[in-house]
């Protein structure tokens, strides 16, 4: 009686395309290019925070509903309200007032959102010449602002009639801003070309 031999196949990694790419190739390339000794020294995307400041519209229920809908649609998560910690008379702001909304993305959702932002949303911008390379803070986190939400394909025309801006912050664990930029470039972030 013959017995069939089955070769065990290693299951292919599933999940967000960008995360798989980071784990298989990007991290190794960064170690080599940045001359780092340890895999844990490679710059890594920790989280992505998407927020909308409500400003003067903090009392307008319609704008609040539109902003909540925008964040829910583009991130797939329910936004959290941000509340003023201090009172500032010049801004007519009292402690405890709602001043904005935010969503913090981690894991698969973070990589999926980053992938969609870089490969779908940014190419849709009109007169786009690349994102600014000056938007890194000292820790190496990168901020990106949008003046209106209509560039996100998840939103219908009716959902973009009330225009509002939003900000995306990439929180990156790295030694310096140059390492963070190297990571974002590997992800495909189109930085504007510097004039020499």
Image (tube, rainbow, N blue to C red):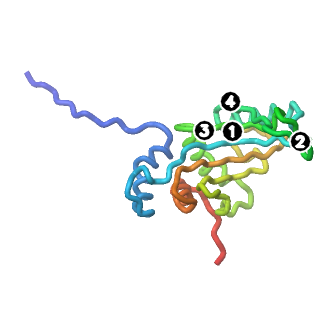
Read off the residue under disc 3: 105
In contact (CB < 8 Å): disc 2 and disc 4? no
Foreground residue among 137 and 18 = 137
Image position of 119 with respect to 100: above or below:
below
Mark 2–mark 3 Cα distance, whole angstroms, equals 27 Å
- What is the total number of numbered labels drawn onto the structure image? 4
Mark 1–mark 2 Cα distance, whole angstroms, equals 26 Å
Residue 78 is marked as 4
Mark 2–mark 4 Cα distance, whole angstroms, equals 22 Å
**Outermost residue, front direction?**
86
Residue 154 is marked as 1
Q: Is residue 158 visible?
A: no
Question: What residue do we see at 63% from left, 48% from top?
Answer: 117
Q: Position of residue 139 (x, y in %)?
A: 59, 55
**Outermost residue, left direction?**
1
Read off the residue under disc 2: 56
Q: Position of residue 168 (x, y in %)?
A: 68, 47
Mark 4–mark 3 Cα distance, whole angstroms, equals 11 Å
Q: Residue 64 sits in which quadrant?
A: top right
**Mark 4 secondary-structure assignment:** loop
Ranked by sequence position, the earlier of labels 3 and 1 is 3
In contact (CB < 8 Å): disc 4 and disc 1? no
Ranked by sequence position, the earlier of labels 4 and 3 is 4
């Amino acid at each position: 009686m013959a017995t069939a031999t089955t070769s065990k196949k290693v299951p292919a990694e599933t999940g967000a395309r960008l995360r798989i790419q980071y784990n298989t190739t990007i991290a190794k390339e960064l170690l080599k290019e940045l001359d780092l000794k340890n895999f844990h020294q490679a710059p890594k995307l920790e989280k992505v925070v998407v927020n909308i400041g409500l400003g003067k519209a903090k009392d307008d229920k319609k704008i609040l509903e539109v902003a909540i809908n925008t964040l829910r649609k583009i991130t797939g998560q329910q936004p959290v309200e941000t509340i003023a910690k201090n009172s500032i008379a010049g801004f007519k702001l009292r402690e405890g007032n709602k001043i904005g909304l935010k969503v913090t993305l981690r894991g698969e959702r973070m990589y999926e959102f980053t992938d969609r932002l870089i490969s779908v949303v940014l190419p849709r911008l009109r007169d786009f010449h690349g994102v600014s390379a000056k938007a890194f803070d000292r820790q190496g986190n990168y901020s990106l602002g949008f003046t209106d939400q209509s560039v996100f394909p998840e939103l219908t025309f009716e959902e973009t009639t009330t225009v509002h801006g939003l900000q995306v912050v990439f929180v990156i664990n790295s030694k310096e801003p140059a390492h963070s930029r190297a990571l974002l470039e590997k992800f495909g972030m189109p930085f504007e070309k510097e004039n020499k």
